[in-house]
Amino acid sequence: MTQPPIPAHALPVVARAPGKCILFGEHAVVRGQPEVLLAIDLYTQVAIRPSPEWRLNGHAGPVADHRYLQTAIREVWTTGTPLDVTAVSRIPKASGMGSSAAFVSGLVAAMGAVQGGVDRATLAQQVFTIEREAQGVGSPGDTSAAIAGGYLTLNTDVAAVGEALWTVTAGEERWTVRRIADPGWVWVVAYSGLPKATGPKVQAVGERFSSWEGPDLLRRFSEVAVAGLRAMAQEDRTETGRLLEENQRLLREVGVSHPRLEALIEATQPAAVGAKVTGAGGGGSIVALPKPGQETDLVRRLARAGAVPFATGPAARGVELV
Ligand code: PMV
């Protein structure tokens, strides 16, 4: 499914973008390895209006220190007119569910609409450039999911994958983003309540990837992600669950799990075919694939274990004007 471009629209503009959940390949994707993820049914809505001065949620104070907003103003807002930017989000912050990517995607899509409209490939590059500049590290997985919606894979070119949507670059690095089929499953994503910090985790794992064991680790991450992609293409739930567990063993090995996340993974067991950390880790969220018909039970178990769980299918559409 090709998504239409963001059309031209005069101020005020409201855009909304979905969060994301990584199923396979986080961290290794930063080094150009395969990743599999989906846009999830939780959104950030961003409104921009003319204003006598720059404001964020009605206040001028936070604007100067907001790295994402400052970078977006510098990178894409060519008209120079100050705006009042209002954001409302259902995506928990620093949870590994892509709240910053959804905010920047909504903001830049809204800015693009005012500046004559923008196609999604351009938007994918702009939003990634802003995220990368503000965050210092990272891959375009989150931003691409917020822009494209649905299920995506990065850096895979195997029989199971569909349409290539775009290639996004940062200097010499490149990531190709493709759409994959929806296996038709409900996922349960559960926030541990522990905020995570992407930058330090990506740095720490990056050091492991640069060490003597790096090539072997990257190969194992890649193999699990490609096998996961194939299992999903065959709608093989049991095998996908087994591969989620295998991916979790690798995430543990590179040090991004946490006792709290392990306890949540443990709590999913009777009702899930597999579960793992999703996102940068060290806190944040887990994702679990329920056994058929056990979605509600899984949500209940995770809530009882103290997490904030969401049952979600894919958000079929990426960022759009509302
Ligand atoms: O935890 P999040 O939502 O910031 O996801 C990070 C995913 C990484 O692969 C660790 C980094 C990236 O940008 O791909």
Image: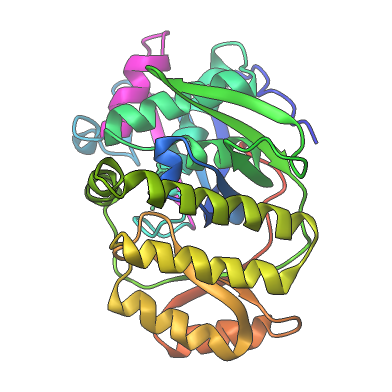
Is residue 70 covered in magenta? Answer: yes
Give the side of residue 188 with respect to residue 278, left or right: right
Is residue 85 or residue 221 the one in the foreground? 221
Which residue: 29% across, 64% down?
282
Which residue: 62% across, 24% down?
166
Question: Coloring scheme of the render?
Answer: rainbow
Stretch in magenta: 67-90
As displayed, is residue 23 above or below residue 48?
A: below
| Residue 163 visible in this rendered orientation of the protein | yes
Is residue 51 or residue 317 the one in the foreground? 317
Q: Name the quadrant of the N terminus.
A: top right
Give the side of residue 140 with respect to residue 18, left or right: left
Horizontal and vertical percent for residue 290?
65, 78
Which residue: 26% across, 40% down?
210
Give the side of residue 190 with respect to residue 178, left or right: left
Is residue 89 or residue 202 the one in the foreground? 202
Is residue 89 covered in magenta? Answer: yes
Is residue 101 or residue 169 the one in the foreground? 169
Horizontal and vertical percent for residue 220?
47, 54
| Residue 27 visible in this rendered orientation of the protein | no
Quadrant position of residue 75: top left
Q: Which residue lies furthest to the top in this view?
A: 79
Q: How many marks?
A: 0
As displayed, is residue 249 above or below residue 54?
A: below
Horizontal and vertical percent for residue 222?
52, 48
Which residue: 49% across, 40% down?
33
Horizontal and vertical percent for residue 74?
32, 16
Q: Name the quadrant of the C terminus.
A: top right
